[in-house]
Amino acid sequence: MPGSDRMNETDESDAERRRRRARFLRDLAEARALRDRVQPRRAKTARLRHAMRMRTFRW
């Protein structure tokens, strides 16, 4: 049946997409941590800016 093959393909590609996304997010977090270590002053100002944004955000 061509329909069941298509469904199987979709499941595999979906799992692959989730794997790629998880890997991308891990790499992104690692890059962010590296940047924070290399540029502590910029990281601190970014943290403060983010905190201010969160404080002024209306839920």
Image (spheres, helix red, strand yellow):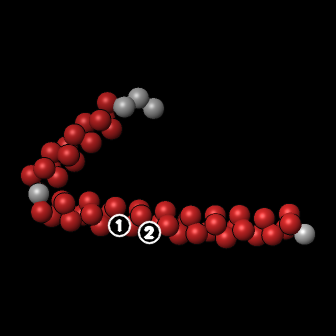
Whether tag 1 and tag 2 are in contact, CB under 8 A, the answer is: yes
Where 2 sits versus 42, above or below? below
Where 2 sits versus 52, above or below? below
Residue at 58 percent of width and 69 percent of height: 16
Horizontally, residue 21 falls left or right of residue 16, namely: left
Residue 32 percent location from the top left of the image? 26, 60
Image-quadrant location for residue 4: bottom right
Kind of residue indicated by mark 1: Asp
Image-quadrant location for residue 8: bottom right
Where 43 sits versus 17, above or below? above
Residue at 11 percent of width and 57 percent of height: 40
Residue at 27 percent of width and 63 percent of height: 31
Horizontally, residue 8 falls left or right of residue 24, namely: right
Kind of residue indicated by mark 2: Arg
> Which residue is farthest right?
1
Horizontally, residue 9 falls left or right of residue 38, namely: right
Image-quadrant location for residue 51: top left
- The dot on residue 16 is none
In this view, the residue in front, 4 or 47, is: 4
Where 1 sits versus 46, above or below? below
In this view, the residue in front, 34 or 51, is: 34
- The dot on residue 23 is 2
- The image quadrant where one finds the C terminus is top left
Label 2 crowd bin: few (<14), some (14–19), many (20+), radius 10 Å? few
> Which residue is farthest front?
2
- The image quadrant where one finds the N terminus is bottom right
Residue 35 percent location from the top left of the image? 19, 60
For disc 1, the marked residue is 27
Q: How far apart are marks 1 and 2 (CA)?
A: 6 Å
**Tag 2's secondary structure?**
helix
